[in-house]
Image (cartoon, rainbow, N blue to C red):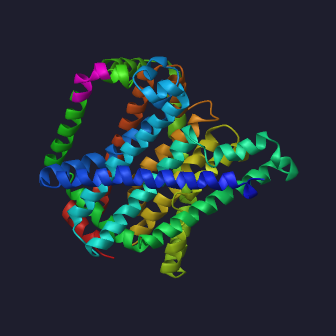
């Protein structure tokens, strides 16, 4: 059985090793870039505004871009070690890992610039520890997504691989067996989170102070000057994509901008199929956030009013990342459908939602809910994509995976960019509502500074 199988724990150690590597490579380079950008205050503000959402774009491509390499034999001609092995799966996994690394790179740059913009609150050394803790936790989440999709698949492939080998028959109940193994995987991740929190001296209350200060800065940063700077950076990226479209299409299989625009136009003018998938995905996101809220809101309120804050904060902190592994077993618990995808979204959204509600607990519930939903959006979209890519028959994640597997890369990119655009617009609307709820930027800074 898996609890006694050393390979199960060995692959867990491999997952942690990859996480540490990802955090070191992506994190250190992102911080180095942040130090260069910080020399210009205007550029730093523009980058903060751009990367708040833009850092998530590479990982949105995780389910639509890497599969393009699986069936492209010509790609092996310019990578000698792959030509020797002829291993397409290795190449796909490498591309997925590159997307995860780029996400950590952008996130590290954003985290560094945001913290430097706020100034030191608890000393340079401790600020550096907290920065690396955030980078490590994000890298752990991305490695789970990367490895579950294209790597060793811990714990998903181990759980269902055991089912295929008939091991649960000795246990007597397949559903109970998978449930126990899923909770074991969750417990292991909780231990990793606990150790990392202690090692990096991180606490939920300390993070709450930082988040309140950061929100006030971001609300103040929503001015025309920062918007023009962020737009200029986006324009430069699009220009480079257009200028380098030939080598990018030849060697990296990135479709040309014109092809992506044509695919977008075809999708917008398409019959009801695309819009039905869009409605299914939107319903799963909304349902998952509500599902997470049904547990997070009463739990945070109870902890805030009845029990000791420090003890409850420590328990809440253990739910960071760990519930994500429960989405794998939900295939047996909830079957194939929107309900399971909504559960997947809730697994990704629970801790960010609880952390947001805890961080702004001095505000009215309506204001807390708006801020928390805005902060939970990227995780909710990732949960939707992860849930719809496998064991699903509808939704934009399923649409993207189908397009990628049939080498319709332009269509897969078009859906991904449209989904990311919708995510950005939705976040922008929420930020506008937040500014109205907590007052203008100057008043928001004064209110959010209250502990």
Residue 156 in the image: above or below residue 442: above
Toward the viewer: 195 or 414? 195
Residue 376 in the figure: left or right of residue 14: left
Q: Residue at x 55, y 56 (%)?
A: 292
Residue 161 visible in the snapshot: yes
Residue 158 in the figure: left or right of residue 398: right
Confirm whether the magenta stretch covers residue 355. Answer: no
Q: From the top left corner, tell me how far across and down residue 209 is, in percent.
A: 34, 71
Range drawn in magenta: 240-247
Toward the viewer: 239 or 129? 129
- For the stretch drawn in magenta, the main secondary structure is helix
Q: From the top left corner, tell me how far across and down residue 93 is, in percent.
A: 50, 36
Residue 300 in the image: above or below residue 5: below
Q: From the top left corner, tell me how far across and down residue 330 is, in percent.
A: 67, 47
Q: Residue at x 38, y 73 (%)?
A: 206
Toward the viewer: 445 or 188? 188
Residue 260 visible in the snapshot: no
Position of the C terminus, as image quadrant, is bottom left
Residue 360 in the figure: left or right of residue 125: right
Toward the viewer: 383 or 32? 32
């Amino acid at each position: 059985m898996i609890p006694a199988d050393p390979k199960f724990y060995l692959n867990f150690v491999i997952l942690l090793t990859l996480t540490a590597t990802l955090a070191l490579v992506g994190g250190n380079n992102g911080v180095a870039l942040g130090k260069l950008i910080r020399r210009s205050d205007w550029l730093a503000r523009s980058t903060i505004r751009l990367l708040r959402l833009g850092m998530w774009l590479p990982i949105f491509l995780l389910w639509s871009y890497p599969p393009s390499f699986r069936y492209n034999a010509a790609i092996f001609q310019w990578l000698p070690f792959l030509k020797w092995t002829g291993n397409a799966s290795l190449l796909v996994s490498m591309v997925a890992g590159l997307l995860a690394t780029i996400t950590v790179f952008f996130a590290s740059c954003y985290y560094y610039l945001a913290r430097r913009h706020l100034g030191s609150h608890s000393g340079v050394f401790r600020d550096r520890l907290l920065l690396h803790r955030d980078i490590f936790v994000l890298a752990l989440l991305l490695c789970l997504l990367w490895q579950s999709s294209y790597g060793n698949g811990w714990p998903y492939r181990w759980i269902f691989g055991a089912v295929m080998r008939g091991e649960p028959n000795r246990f007597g109940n397949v559903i109970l067996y998978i449930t126990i193994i899923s909770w074991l995987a969750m417990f292991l991740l909780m231990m990793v989170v606990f150790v990392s929190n202690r090692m990096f001296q991180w606490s939920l209350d300390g993070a709450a102070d930082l988040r309140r200060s950061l929100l006030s800065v971001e609300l103040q940063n929503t001015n025309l000057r920062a918007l023009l700077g962020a737009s200029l950076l986006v324009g430069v990226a699009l220009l480079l994509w257009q200028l380098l479209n030939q080598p990018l299409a030849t060697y990296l299989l990135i479709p040309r901008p014109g092809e992506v625009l044509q695919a977008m136009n075809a999708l917008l003018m398409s019959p009801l199929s695309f819009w039905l998938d869009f409605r299914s995905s939107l319903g799963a996101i909304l349902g998952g956030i509500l599902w997470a809220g049904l547990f997070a809101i009463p739990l945070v309120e109870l902890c805030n009013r009845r029990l000791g804050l420090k003890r409850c904060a420590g328990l809440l902190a253990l739910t960071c990342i760990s519930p994500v592994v429960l989405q794998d077993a939900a295939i047996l618990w909830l079957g194939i459908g929107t309900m399971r995808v909504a559960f997947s979204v809730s697994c990704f959204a629970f801790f960010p939602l609880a952390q947001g509600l805890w961080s702004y607990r001095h505000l009215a519930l309506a204001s807390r809910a708006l801020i928390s939903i805005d902060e939970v959006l990227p995780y909710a979209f990732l949960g939707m994509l992860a849930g719809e890519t496998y064991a699903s028959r509808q939704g934009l994640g399923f649409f993207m995976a189908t397009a990628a597997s049939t080498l319709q890369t332009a269509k897969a990119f078009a859906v991904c960019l449209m989904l990311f655009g919708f995510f950005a617009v939705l976040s922008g609307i929420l930020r506008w509502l937040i500014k109205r709820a907590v007052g203008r930027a100057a008043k928001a800074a004064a209110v959010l500074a209250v502990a």
